[in-house]
């Protein structure tokens, strides 16, 4: 989850928010590629899927700050 200071910075500065959004979107895309191409253990895959889920929640919060 996004910490207080990051949330505050994103709320106050749209450039920071937009960069954060792009970074999270890229990280999600790369993680999904890793899952598709991977031969990871089930535990590692579950961890990665949880991280993707957390990142999507962060994205939703950042998208709401755009409104």
Image: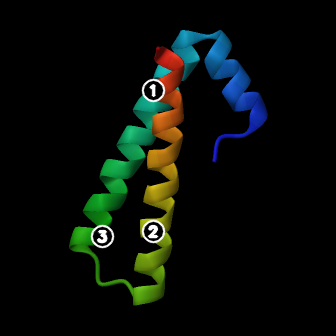
SS type, badge 3: helix
Q: CB under 8 Å between callouts 3 and 1? A: no
- Residue to which mark 1 is pinned: 63
| Residue 44 point in image, percent of width and height | 46, 80
- Residue to which mark 3 is pinned: 35
List the single residue furthest toward the right.
Answer: 5
| Residue 65 point in image, percent of width and height | 54, 20
- Gap between marks 2 and 1, in whole Å? 22 Å
- Gap between marks 2 and 3, in whole Å? 8 Å
Q: Splitting the image into 4 quarters, where does residue 3 fall?
A: top right
- Residue to which mark 2 is pinned: 48
| Residue 35 point in image, percent of width and height | 30, 70
The residue sitting at 31% across, 49% down in the picture is 29
Q: CB under 8 Å between callouts 2 and 3? A: yes
Q: Splitting the image into 4 quarters, where does residue 11 fall?
A: top right
Q: Tag on residue 10?
A: none
Relative to 23, say whether 64 is above or below. above
Relative to 35, say whether 33 is above or below. above
């Amino acid at each position: 989850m996004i910490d207080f200071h990051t949330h505050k910075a994103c709320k106050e500065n749209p450039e920071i928010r937009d960069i954060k959004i792009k970074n999270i979107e890229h990280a999600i895309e790369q993680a999904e590629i890793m899952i598709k191409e991977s031969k990871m253990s089930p535990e590692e895959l579950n961890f990665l899927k949880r991280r993707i889920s957390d990142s999507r929640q962060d994205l939703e919060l950042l998208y709401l700050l755009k409104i």
